Amino acid sequence: MVVAVSDGAIHSHTAAVRLTPAELARELLDHLGPTVVAALSQVRNRKQPYKWAIDDGPRPRIESLQRLQVAHRAWWTIAESEGDEVARAWFIGANPRLDEVPPYMAIREGRFSEVLAAADEFVVAG
């Protein structure tokens, strides 16, 4: 089955997959901060994302890596059209499209397709 997706979704997916785990962690740390990155990755230690950001450092578990990739895709979707500050505010604020749950918490809960759809809808609604 082939699913129709937007060009932006394809581009954000390609960009996230091409980043090494260390690059992915560094970008998210730069834009969202360690508390949000640790929370969405399901790790308790907010220093853990800094360890992932080291080129030869430890790598995130598969589940955490998936969450980092989804977070990067959602962040990229919004930042590309609205800027970094709006993207960060979107990530940490209650979101009506996610039952008033902040997107970073929805990613933590594994609601990937809902978060990505909410990011797309935010950009389209302008």
Image: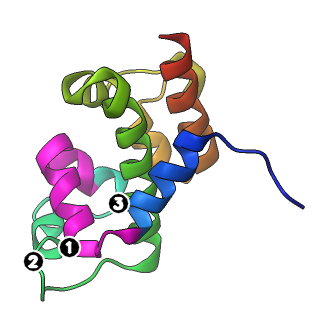
Using the image, tell me which numbered label, if any, was put on residue 41: 3
Q: Reply above or below: 96 against 4.
A: above
Residue at 32%, 21% in the rendered image: 82
x then y, percent, for residue 54: 9, 77
Label 3 residue SS:
loop
Amino acid carrying label 2: it is Ile
How much space separates mark 2 and mark 1, taking CA atoms?
Answer: 6 Å
Quadrant hosting residue 124 = top right
Residue at 28%, 75% in the rendered image: 20
Foreground residue, 41 or 21? 21
Q: Is residue 18 left or right of residue 47?
A: right
Which residue corresponds to mark 1?
Answer: 22
Residue at 34%, 33% in the rendered image: 80
Which residue range is magenta in the image? Answer: 18-38
How much space separates mark 3 and mark 2, taking CA atoms?
Answer: 17 Å
Q: Reply above or below: 85 against 11.
A: above
Q: Does label 3 or label 2 sit earlier along the sequence?
A: 3
Which residue corresponds to mark 2?
Answer: 54
Label 1: few (<14), some or many (≥20) within 10 Å? Answer: many
Amino acid carrying label 3: it is Ser
Q: Can residue 17 be seen in this view?
A: yes
Q: In this view, does 65 lie to the left or right of 122?
A: left
Q: Does label 1 or label 3 sit earlier along the sequence?
A: 1
Amino acid carrying label 1: it is Ala
